[in-house]
Amino acid sequence: MKILFAFPALLLAVLFILGAGCSTIAPARTDLPTAGTSVTVSIQPDITRYTVLMSSAPGIGLTPQINGTLPQDSLMYVWKTDYGHFVGWSAPDYKVRELGNTSASGNGTKVYWTYVGENESGMRPPVHITLDLIDRATGDTLGHAERVIGWDTGNDTAVIG
């Protein structure tokens, strides 16, 4: 007889606990951008002229500049170029690391753009470098920037405007 009364009471208690847990509302994240949030992305070059003969730098250093409030832990920085390639170069060892013509990282550190130093018979093409700021959770593009690199009259020095 005791079991008959205990079982429904236990069942009701479990249902109330589950019901209370399922109806609890988690606070919304306030650090994520919304459709109305203004975020601007730009690319800041370290130098405006570069040739592979320079020994002081492995390329044109490019740093992302973000204006707006974004959660840094959920961002992906995607760099792309249609000519040349990116390299990494940083402390503590300052070894040049090949990154290819597309490079993605989650920390927003500087990348360097460079090109093969061989003389080309024709004019080198204008170089388009893009940076997309991606939300890792949703895959949405939160910001986009582009820089164009041209060439001097000797076709061997990259000039970024």
Image (spheres, helix red, strand yellow):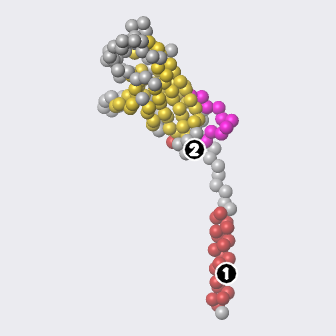
Give the residues drawn in magenta, as a range: 32-41
Residue at x-position 64% and y-position 83%: 7
Is 10 located above or below residue 22 in the figure?
below
Front residue of this view, candidates 36 and 31: 36
Q: Choose top left, top right, bottom left or bottom right for residue 92.
A: top left
Closer to the N terminus: mark 2 or mark 1? 1
Q: Where is mark 2, residue-wise?
A: 138
Q: Main SS type for the magenta part?
A: loop
Residue at x-position 65% and y-position 39%: 34
Residue furthest to the top in view is 153
Q: Choose top left, top right, bottom left or bottom right for residue 23.
A: bottom right
Instruction: Tell whether position 77 is magenta.
Output: no
Instruction: Answer left or right for 57 relative to 142.
Output: left
Q: Where is mark 1, residue-wise?
A: 9
Would you say residue 78 is visible in this rendering?
yes
Residue 99 horizontal/vertical position (percent): 38, 32
Residue 127 horizontal/vertical position (percent): 47, 20
Residue 129 horizontal/vertical position (percent): 48, 24
Residue at x-position 67% and y-position 82%: 8
